[in-house]
Amino acid sequence: STVSSRLARMLRQDQADRQIFADTPASTWNDPEHVAARARMGENDAQRRAEVQEMLDAGEVHEPDDCYSAAMIFQHGTVAQDYLKAHRLAYQAALGGHGPARGLTAATLDRFLLTVEQPQIVGTQYYTNGPCHMDPFDTSLPDEARLALGARTLEQSETLMRAVDQGLAWDEAVAEAARVPVTRTHQPLLQQARAALAGHDLIGGYAMAVAAALEHEPGAKPVVEGAFQQLRTELS
């Protein structure tokens, strides 16, 4: 459709704007040409978000691929609401069967939480200023939920951070983490989500409910919606 082709084009432009930084060492990012490129990228990002918002307002974004493209564009926003919008779009895409959208659902939730001065809950945001770390990070979410959300287990993340600290390049550290064995228990998550929400753990309960919905547990979607409204009201 026209909507799909427009969104796909915008996503390609979004990625192209970032390629200059992927292709050059971080030590050069303060050079005048990179500073100018970053400013242009910020302007382009804002324009793309405005264009996607018009499509959302018109009710034109439905397909999983389209929701994913829109989420990718909004995750490069500047404020908490951009990340929350990206999270919801990624969740819709993941519900529709879009594989990579699971990881984006997790990453955008963590990014939103950190922006509103809450600890990340899934564990997707790494910091390499000094020893690699993920703080602030609430590690209480079960690994089963992390895996359902397309994220690494705690042991995998610890392996990745150790590898970075030992001097491995990021891609090599990611590969090292991927070699850590993972056992899926497929234990139901909705019951744990409800218990967490009843115990006033809104963030943990919401994250587990999202994981349950993505694993197609019956009854999970309404729990996600109720918790999301509460999350948006209390944290935005």
Image (cartoon, helix red, strand yellow):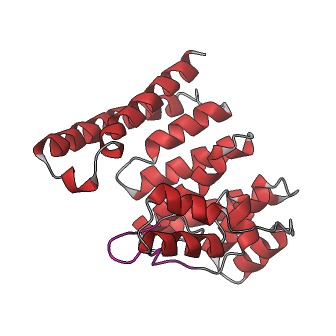
Magenta-tinted stretch: 126-138
**Residue depicted at 69% across the width and 40% down the height:** 98
Q: Where does residue 13 sit, x and y in percent of width and height?
A: 39, 29
Q: Is residue 109 something that shows in the picture? A: no
The outermost residue toward the top is 2
Viewer-closest of 212 and 183 = 183
Left or right: 57 as drawn, with respect to 1: left
Q: Is residue 196 something that shows in the picture? A: yes
- Residue 30 magenta-highlighted: no
Image quadrant in which you'd find residue 10: top left
Q: Where does residue 46 sit, x and y in percent of width and height?
A: 32, 38
The outermost residue toward the bottom is 199
The outermost residue toward the left is 32
Magenta stretch secondary structure, dominant? loop
Q: Where does residue 197 sit, x and y in percent of width and height?
A: 71, 76
**Residue depicted at 43% across the width and 74% down the height:** 165
Left or right: 229 as drawn, with respect to 40: right
In the rendered image, which quarter contains the N terminus? top right
Left or right: 160 as drawn, with respect to 95: left
How many tags in the picture?
A: 0
Left or right: 133 as drawn, with respect to 205: left
Q: Where does residue 151 sit, x and y in percent of width and height?
A: 64, 61
**Residue depicted at 52% across the width and 26% down the height:** 8
